[in-house]
Structures are given as structure tokens and as C-alpha cells.
Amino acid sequence: QADKQTVWFYDIWSKKEAILKGEGIGLGTDPAEISVSHTFGGGKYSNKIWYFSPCPNIDSYSLQLCISQSNPNVSWYQWQDGSILPLR
């Protein structure tokens, strides 16, 4: 299992990557230009605020959905054995 510093790094990285993709610019911009806050669960780039909905229960992965609306109501699902099941 990864140590806390490694988990933290990938959490921050995936949030910054999600913001850049949300902006439509991908990794063509330096991720250091993005500010991410754990206090309000969002990030900021180019004077725009982004909010996160982390994907639950994916061992050893950090996947973030970012949206420009606060308190997004997001449901996560997985495909398993020919069925779509909710992730919890």
C-alpha cells in the first residue's frame, strides 16, 4: 500500500489534471499554476473556481471529476459481469 505522501501527491495531481481538462487545455499548462484547496474541496485556475467529486472505491487510483458548480450531485457506477452497479 502506498504511503500517505504518495497518496497525497496523486490526489493533488489528479485534481490539477481534472481542472486543466475542464478548462480544455490538458497538460499543456504547468500544473503549478493551479491552486487546490482541501478546505473547500475545490481548486482555482485563471480566476475560475472548480469543485471536485472524487470517485469512490478504486484501489490504488485517484480519479477526480471536476465541475464548475458547487456541491455537485454525482452518482458513480461500474460495469461488472454485464451489469451496471453503483459504486459506494
Image: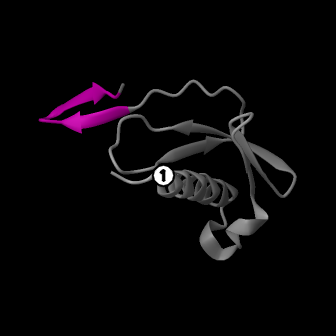
The answer to whether residue 29 is above or below residue 12 is below
Task: Locate residue 53: give its quadrant.
Answer: top right
Towards the viewer: 27 or 58: 58
Left or right, residue 55 beside residue 37: left
Left or right, residue 48 beside residue 5: right
> How is the structure coloured here?
one colour
Residue 39 image offset from top left, x and y in percent: 74, 35
Mark 1 surroundings within 10 Å by alpha-carbon count, few (fewer than 14), some (14 through 19), many (20 or more): some
Report the quarter where the C terminus lies.
Answer: top left
Residue 8 image offset from top left, x and y in percent: 55, 51
According to the picture, the residue beneath numbered tag 1 turns out to be 7
- The range drawn in magenta is 77-87
Identify the amino acid type marked 1: Val
The residue sitting at 45% across, 38% down in the picture is: 55
The residue sitting at 49% across, 50% down in the picture is: 4
The answer to whether residue 66 is above or below residue 20 is above
Towards the viewer: 37 or 25: 37
Instruction: Check residue 81 for magenta coloring.
Output: yes
Which residue is outermost to the left? 81
The residue sitting at 58% across, 59% down in the picture is: 13
Task: Locate residue 23: give its quadrant.
Answer: bottom right
Left or right, residue 25 beside residue 7: right
